[in-house]
Amino acid sequence: MDAKATPIDRDWWKRRPVYQIYPRSFLDTNGDGVGDLVGITQGLTALKALGAGIVWLSPIFFSPMADNGYDMADYCRIDPRFGTMADFEALLAQAALLDLKIVLDIALNHTSIEHPWFVAAARDPTSPYRDFYHWREKPNNWHSIFGGPAWSQVPDGAYYLHLFDKTQADLNWDNPTVRQHIYEAMRFWLTKGVSGFRLDVVTVISKPAGLPDVADPSPGPLYKALAIGPNLHPWLREMRREVFDHYDCVAIGEGPGLNPVRAAQLVDPADPMLDMIYHFDFVDPPQRANQPWDRVWFKSVFSRWDQAIGPRGWNTCVLGNHDLRRLISRFGDQNVNDGQVAKALAAAYLLQRATPFIYQGDELGLGDTIITSFEDLNDVWAKTTYRLELEVGGTEAQALAKAAAMTRDHARTPYPWTPLGGFTTGTPWLKPTLNKGGVDLATQMADPNSVWSFYRFALKLREADPATWIFGAYEDIAPEHPDVFVFKRGEYGLVSINFGSQPYHLCDLDHNLLEGRRLLAAFGDVEGDQLGPWACCIFGRGN
Ligand code: NOJ
């Protein structure tokens, strides 16, 4: 072997933070109000400046967009709303220049009902494509995750399964031809130069034989009942053999319904199926007396997942994404300003033993949007929620309140490039979030104390001392403390965040913990060794 050969960094996905782009809302360069690939190409330098290493694009494939691309009608074609294949190739070239890896999103549990496979299957029960989907004469009791039954009829009266919207028909993965088609599509993109996939709801692709009724068919319990079906492991091993093993790429699973033990099996380096998987334990923060959300619970989620996966496989840390309300509304505190909340949360999730996933806009501390009418809603799930509320006798105001509280539109508004917006010269496809001042990229890049600058600092820390901040063992020093989150990373790293309303004294810590450590950063009201509410101190190597 040539001793000078550069070693291949096969584990780049452990070191590189992920930035998730929601393409419709990132940057529109042709004035049609919808973000596009040329816009993404232009925006990559800003992501590089932030410290991202992997850019995950939410779906860009050809789609009727009932679920904004998670309803795919062609796995090997770019949707014209986003641009052309040439635009995508230019994006890949620019990403390579900047040393950014591009990861695509693939919905492999279902296709759009406008996919030619489904069109053929629905038209003709004898078509070979019929077996690409799940059919029944009578539905079982499963509910769609988006509300209502999980079964709809085609003109010949047969019911097809859709765990999501009725426009998203579940593929029958038991059919080996279906699997081969999906693998072929993945190879197509990997050969083009993408660096991996985020596999949409991959945990539910294997359905139980006979599709039996479940005890509780509502979304959470149904996900749990369906996660890791009988053939998930063999199929993921097959996918690895047929696809991932042949490329330098990463396989990231979206893992609804998973618990840490089951997740650890999927990313076990001794029997690798996926490289990383992310969970939903952070979605609904429970409350605790006098607090909007329970800090002890919050800390326990980090520890539970680190203990299960950290020492062997590799963890992810996903707090926000395009399906959830914004971080500062889920984990905020009405007495504290949004920027400080955003920084404190960043200190908690960017410095874990895990690959952090940053969702577009969270690095600015972007908040929820304001929904005042049905016309403000785009999310198919929210619209279904609205309709179902009316169907059970709710008023329009009740239906709107229910939809506004859960709609995924909160996280999908146009990206604020400048104080005036800067996303489009046309009419944006979704009403932008109101900028209360300073929540835009241009302002924050110029301000060393902004949320954006704090994100950049934390990501640089990982880069500068990976032994501590990427690979260092994780330990929560005070798991039972009701307010303060203090964790150790390796020998030298220590993060202390006060999520409470009372000052906290660092001298309450065991002093050995601070020995040999240097104060690297602090924000909020920090005086001497006292941390005010929502203040934070980060300590690292003392050299
Ligand atoms: C999970 C995706 O994140 C979500 O946006 C989508 O609606 C469902 N999967 C269905 O594809």
Image: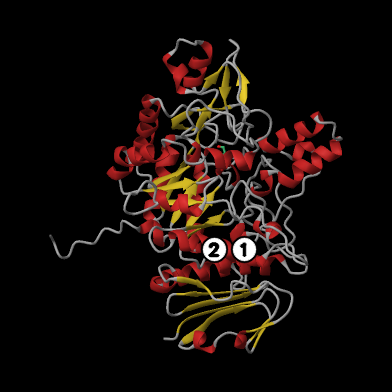
Q: Residue at x 50, y 37 (%)?
A: 204
Give, as a three-letter code, the residue at label 1: Phe
On-image quarter of the N terminus:
bottom left
On-image quarter of the C terminus:
bottom left
Element class at badge 2: helix
Return the residue found at the far left.
1
Q: Is residue 301 above or below residue 115?
A: below
Q: Quadrant of ligand 1?
A: top right
Front residue of 335 and 190: 335
For residue 7, say whether it is visible. Answer: yes
Count of labels in the image: 2
Q: Residues within 10 Å of mark 2 (few under 14, many from 20)?
A: many
Front residue of 438 and 215: 215
Q: Residues within 10 Å of mark 1 (few under 14, many from 20)?
A: some
The colour scheme used here is secondary structure
Locate residue 318, reporting x and y percent.
Answer: 54, 56
Element class at badge 1: helix
The span from disc 1 to disc 2 (Cα, nearest Å) is: 7 Å
Locate residue 514, reporting x and y percent.
Answer: 51, 86
Locate residue 369, reporting x and y percent.
Answer: 73, 50
Q: Is residue 515 above or below residue 525?
A: below
Locate residue 210, reporting x and y percent.
Answer: 50, 25
What label does residue 541 carry, if any?
Answer: none
In the rendered image, which quarter is residue 424 located in? top right
For residue 200, say whether it is visible. Answer: no
- The residue that label 2 is drawn on is 302
Q: Residue at x 36, y 58 (%)?
A: 12
In the rendered image, which quarter is residue 541 located in? bottom left
For the residues bearing labels 1 and 2, Cβ distance under 8 angstroms: yes
Q: Residue at x 84, y 40 (%)?
A: 398
What label does residue 298 carry, if any?
Answer: 1
Side of 321 relative to 341 (left or right): left
